Amino acid sequence: MQTEQYDAVVCGGGPAGVAAAIAAARHGAHTLIIEQTGAFGGLGTQGLVPCFAPFSWRKDHLLIRGIGWEIVERLRSISGAGDGAWIHTDPEKLKLLFDRMLSESGVIPALFTTLTGAEVADGAIASATAYTKSGARTLRAKAFIDCTGDADLAHLAGCPTEKGDSDGRMQAASLCFVLAGVDVKAFEAFRESIGGGLAFRQFIHDSATAGKLHDSDRYQHLASAVCPREESGLIYFNYGHLYDIDGTDDDSLTQAMMLGRELVHDFVSFARSDIPGMANAVLMASGTLPGIRETRRIVGDFVLEESAFTQGRTHDDDIALYDYPVDLHDTSHRTDDSSATNPFLVGGVREIASKITYGIPYRTLLPKGVNNLLVAGRCISSDRPIQGSARVMPACFATGQAAGTAAAMRSHTGEGLAEIDVEKLRETLLADGAYLTERDQ
Ligand SMILES: Cc1cc2nc3c(=O)[nH]c(=O)nc-3n(C[C@H](O)[C@H](O)[C@H](O)COP(=O)(O)OP(=O)(O)OC[C@H]3O[C@@H](n4cnc5c(N)ncnc54)[C@H](O)[C@@H]3O)c2cc1C
């Protein structure tokens, strides 16, 4: 078994992992990033999630900047991102951009490399183990960064985590997909004629109730987001709810993919016969990763709570500011009202988000029990509701950048990650383009 030594090892190459690795390498850390699939980008590429959430809910003031916004600008420069507040993305261009940015920064990339174990000694991760086609790799690092989305490394290292609600139930998962061969203009005209996006969601719900689409105990047709690309005749769908899926359980993940494909093909048959503009639609691709919204969250000394959002709370050690609403999808099938399946659509949280900003403190990246591990992305130390905000990609870029920067600082000074000079970290983030000044509430 090979044993390798790095300054920073990033586990998981989604939005958080890519930003973490780039930040660490740009600050001089000898950095490895491992990713279990064949491309970087996580749900933004392999999951076919079709757009970045707003980088600020209030259109006049960008909150997430730094590496996240650099990604947007560079993606736009290769015609891979749209101009709206919800930034439509081209997953293939995003894969290419991430490859290029990681290479330019000097990060060592390792695709098809799966984290499988961790050895802990004296309050630190002594090594992590990864599976590859060429055999097992033993990875040692001054700092590890867990960006698996599921807090896999924290869990393997014995750090405390929580999962789902008090009954362990998690938000519904979705298998995103893309249709080709759509007459987008005709579809758009139809959607407008019935009243727009929410009315289209109701149309899908009514069609399922009428038996034209087939819901089951385990899944439900639901058009969460429909992103048409008129110029190419493609429509990206963040569609359907898959219930009782646990993204940390391999049987459950298998079910998610198989149920998801049933749901998607059922929709495509229906779309070809019943949705104007879709008569010639073909399923071009469905995600190679299931759209998992929620699994483990680390429980650090500090847990970010929903009240930070509702009260617009900031903290001395904030490494990002954000305002995306609390976006929690249901945990089980509801038949009453299509809009109720995601209270985000109807709740007052949107109104709050248009007025306040909350801070994400450095302490949310610090798990308990080991002193050389940071966590970034959707599994930071938070309660469930605020995870429903901090899980979207702009926030993951920001927590990733902060974790990578902190890891590089540690690799230079050798101190524990909880002991680093947070003011210096904030200054470095500011110098690297992040935005940390509280705006007017
Ligand atoms: C259906 C759906 C729709 C969404 N819509 C939007 C949206 O419109 N806009 C938005 O901004 N956000 C959206 N989100 C949220 C967002 O996409 C995710 O929360 C975000 O991608 C999380 O980033 P991450 O880097 O933490 O994790 P992920 O994107 O999940 O990336 C984790 C990466 O780690 C890898 N990995 C996992 N375990 C291991 C391991 N053991 N070894 C090696 N590699 C591993 C995975 O393969 C993956 O590449 C959506 C999420 C879902 C599920």
Image: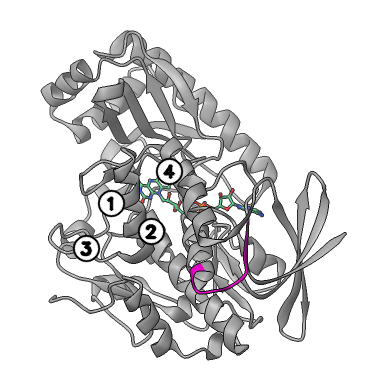
Amino acid carrying label 4: it is Leu
In space, the residues marked 1 and 4 are separated at their CA atoms by 27 Å
- Tell me where residue 36 appears, x and y as whole percent: 65, 48
Q: Provide the residue designation for mark 4.
A: 94
Category of crowding for the residue at label 4, using alpha-carbon neighbours closer than 10 angstroms: few (below 14), some (14–19), many (at least 20): many
Separation of marks 3 and 4 at Cα, in angstroms: 21 Å
Snapshot quadrant of residue 145: bottom right
Q: In front of the other: label 2 or label 3? A: 3
Query: Comparing marks 2 and 4, which lies closer to the viewer?
Result: 4
The span from disc 2 to disc 4 (Cα, nearest Å) is: 24 Å
Q: Amino acid at mark 3?
A: Leu
Magenta stretch? 26-33
Q: Residue at label 2? A: 388
Which label's residue is closer to the chain start, 3 or 1? 3
Q: Is residue 330 above or below residue 335?
A: below
Q: Which mark is residue 62?
A: 3
Task: Give the secondary structure at mark 2.
Answer: helix
Residue under label 1, please give it.
Answer: 344
Q: Earlier in the sequence, mark 2 or mark 4?
A: 4
